[in-house]
């Protein structure tokens, strides 16, 4: 089998795309980027979209062209294709631990000296090892102290610990203390608007106190960064955050669609879909059934299975290579060979399963974008 299988070529009709495939509706995609940038105009915050949701250099380039300063990633290996693709400011919003991983990070920063490469820390022992790795590689790395603002996953818990860690960073000549990473991940999916608001008020209060403590200790804190698609306007309006990191907004998924929508906030459209083919069709005593050629190897199910982007059908079950739909009301008839769209439950791990994103406008393929950081998990 050809390892460079591509589901479509520019100019193909939607019906000619091989399946299963990820497709992005470019009109919706472009509108999502524009809405995000317009919504924070005048808020005095920079936009650094999180690229872990799409892992695609072309998408990052379009975000930067619209005004973003760079991107976030989660792993050193994820940072590499974005730096190589011309994204000049990349922040690893995660801790990097272990001699080999730290050496790889320092080597990456040395390889792209004109770019900014940043990383998060929450332990002084890692700061010392990172500084030594950068010294050996003749590299400089930006460092952000991760603050645990309620996610209970990583980060220091109070301003005093942040000051101690900031002093450790400042003592390393090859490290540049930029400020704070104050991301409240689980707040993004709290369904109620008021729940999310209370969570970010608490996060912003801790970030403000920590920023002020760093300043009182004579330590720089030029940047307080964080926020996601579910809360970014709250951080932007806080007067504390200087940078926001929404990621899913550009593509969207079922899970984010479950959030209560504040009527004053921009509404982001679902722009990325899984295109699948009806490969079996039955109407018998068990009901009206359509089986699609996309299953667990095509989309993640941690937030539930991908859902039909059309009415009248529901997911009965999912297996490795199949999704079985049952008719539950009025909707398309679905015939053998029909191409249908599914909405992914969780965009990030779904994209990571694919090599390509097919960009479609007006029913025609405009481009096929590689998922450059697919599988970059170390």
Image (tube, rainbow, N blue to C red):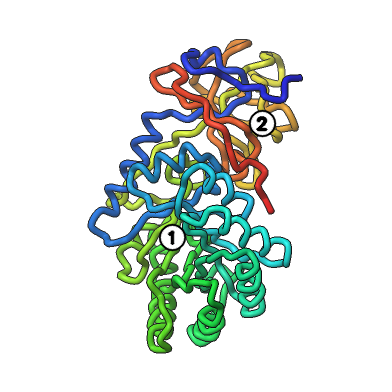
**Which residue is painted at 70% across and 14% down in the image?**
284
Q: Is residue 80 above or below residue 374?
A: below
Q: Can residue 311 be seen in this snapshot?
A: no
Q: Is residue 171 above or below residue 233?
A: below
Circle 2 Cα neighbour tier, 10 Å, few/some/many (<14 / 14–19 / ≥20)? few
Query: Mark 1 = which residue?
Result: 227
* Residue 183 percent location from the top left of the image: 49, 64
Q: Which mark is residue 97?
A: none
Q: Which mark is residue 316?
A: 2
Q: For marks 1 and 2, give the one nearer the viewer.
A: 1
Circle 1 Cα neighbour tier, 10 Å, few/some/many (<14 / 14–19 / ≥20)? many
* Left/right of residue 83 with respect to residue 250 in the rendered view: right
Give whichever of 92, 284 is nearer the camera: 92
**Which residue is painted at 40% across and 43% down in the image?**
63
Q: Reading the chain from its start, which is encountered first: label 1 or label 2? A: 1
Q: Is residue 283 above or below residue 187?
A: above
């Amino acid at each position: 089998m050809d390892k460079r299988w591509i589901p479509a070529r520019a100019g193909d009709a939607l019906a000619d795309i091989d399946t299963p495939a990820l497709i992005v509706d470019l009109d919706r995609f472009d509108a999502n980027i524009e809405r995000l940038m317009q919504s924070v105009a005048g808020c005095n915050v920079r936009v650094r979209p999180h690229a872990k949701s799409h892992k695609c250099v072309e998408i990052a380039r379009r975000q930067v062209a619209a005004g973003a300063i760079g991107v976030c990633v989660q792993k050193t290996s994820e940072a590499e294709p974005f730096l190589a693709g011309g994204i000049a400011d990349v922040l690893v919003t995660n801790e990097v631990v272990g001699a080999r991983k730290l050496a790889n990070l320092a080597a990456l920063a040395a390889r792209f000296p004109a770019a900014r490469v940043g990383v998060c820390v929450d332990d002084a022992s890692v700061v010392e090892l990172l500084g030594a790795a950068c010294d050996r590689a003749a590299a400089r790395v930006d460092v952000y102290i991760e603050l645990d603002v309620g996610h209970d996953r990583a980060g220091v818990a109070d301003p005093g610990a942040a000051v101690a860690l900031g002093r450790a960073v400042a003592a390393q000549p090859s490290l540049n203390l930029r400020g704070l990473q104050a991301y409240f991940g689980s707040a993004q999916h709290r369904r109620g608007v008021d729940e999310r608001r209370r969570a970010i008020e608490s996060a912003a209060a801790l970030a403000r106190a920590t920023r002020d403590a760093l300043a009182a200790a004579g330590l720089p804190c030029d940047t307080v960064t964080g926020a996601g698609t579910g809360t970014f306007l709250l951080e932007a309006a806080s007067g504390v955050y200087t940078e926001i990191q929404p990621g899913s907004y550009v593509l969207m998924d079922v899970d984010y669609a479950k959030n209560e929508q504040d009527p004053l906030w921009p509404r982001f459209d679902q722009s990325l879909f899984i295109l699948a083919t009806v490969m079996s069709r039955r109407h018998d005593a068990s009901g009206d059934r359509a089986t699609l050629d996309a299953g667990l190897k095509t989309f993640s199910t941690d937030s539930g299975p991908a859902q039909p982007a059309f009415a009248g059908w529901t997911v009965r079950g999912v297996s490795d290579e199949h999704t079985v739909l049952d008719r539950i009301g009025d909707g398309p008839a679905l015939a053998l060979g029909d191409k249908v769209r599914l909405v992914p439950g969780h965009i990030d791990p779904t994209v990571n399963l694919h090599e390509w994103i097919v960009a479609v406008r007006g029913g025609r393929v405009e481009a096929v974008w590689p998922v450059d950081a697919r599988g970059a998990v170390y």
